[in-house]
Image: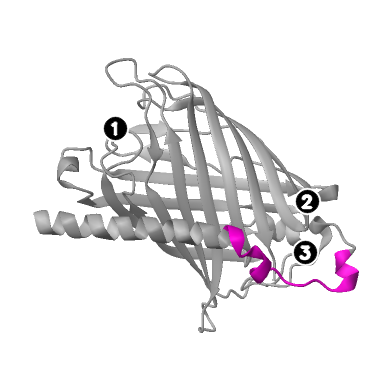
Amino acid sequence: MKLRLNCLSEIRTGLTGLCIATILAGFTSGHVWAHEDHDEEKKLPPHEQPHRAEPPTGGHKNLAEAATNPIANLIQFQVQNSYSPSNHNSSGYSNVTTFQPVIPIKLPWEKVPLLITRSTLPYVTTPDFDGPVDRKRGFGDFTLLGLFSPKLETKGVQVGFGPTLVVPTAGDNEFVGSGKWQAGPSALYINMQTPSIQWGLFGFHLWDFADSNAGSDDRQHVSKLSLQPFITKHFKGGWYVATPEVPQTYDFNTDKWTLALGPQVGKVTKLGKIPVKIFGALYYNPENDAGPTAEWTAKFNITFLFPE
């Protein structure tokens, strides 16, 4: 058992390093991935530039619509900060800063030509837990999502299916991570048939299958379902409004939901010469019996876009 835990610890350490390297590569190598635009397209604002990299069901109208498609054939690097001034069953604020590269991979199969990978690493600041435990900080668990996108006959519809893996990179910091290796299936459906509107559903389920170390075997097992229905409406000038990009999560161990209700407003524009998606959001979680969870959350996101 000890040998197995040591092995998992070494794998966790290696994947942490790989995650950080991937994030740095995504941030610093954008000029390598970016496509050199034609002279005429350089004159267009980012939200009007055509998006050449087509998904399996056809291309998007422009870069702005590709930027809000979770499984678009588009390299992205997201940095976002979620600040919660009030939390249920705890005192003071909490904060989560998230780094998330999204990298599509072309596959050699005609029927399944695309794999979308999304890596997420959060840095967590917990609230004060009103007792012997004060505020805690540290990197949370690393999540790797892979969605295979098959070619469909129906135009304007895209789906993705694949695995999700959670690596307990938080280690023995039980306040910012689960202390469990987790895995499960994920699926996404998006409909783009109505001009300027995207809608769909993203969902995944996670179960734990191993402890991160010898001290985490007494932590609660994981069985969580996350569902994210979404709709996005695009406007002129690169602006859009959308539902939360935070899933509604049901914990089967506690029989409790954690919700995120509220609007998201964003714009596709430029930061220097790099196209970016910027959005702000305000979420409310009315469920106050699901542990020390955020009540109100203000989120700011900037996503660097690297179209072909």
Which sits in the foreground, 17 or 226?
17
What residue did someone put label 3 on? 61
Q: Which residue is drawn at 34% across and 50% down?
A: 206
Tell me, yes or no, whether the highlighted magenta stretch contains residue 40. yes
* Sequence-first tag of 2 and 1: 1
- Residue lying furthest left in this view? 1
**Residue 303 position (above or below residue 221):** below
* Amino acid marked by disc 1: Thr
Q: Which segment is the magenta one?
A: 27-42
Residue 142, image x, y percentages: 39, 51
Sort mark 1 into few (<14), some (14-19) or many (20+) by Cα contacts within 10 Å.
few
Residue 163 placement, left or right of 46? left
Instruction: Decide which of 77, 284 is in the foreground and name it.
Output: 77
Tell me the number on the disc at residue 147: none
- Quarter containing the N terminus: bottom left
Towards the viewer: 161 or 88: 88
Residue drawn at x 73%, y 47% as measured from the top left: 233
N-terminal of the pair, mark 3 or mark 1, is 3
The disc placed on residue 269 is 2
Tell me the kind of residue under disc 2.
Thr
In the rendering, at what x and y percent does residue 290 appear?
36, 27
Image check: 43 left or right of 91? right
Residue identifier under label 1: 254
Residue type pointed to by label 3: Lys
Query: Mark 2 against mark 1, which lies toward the viewer?
Result: 2
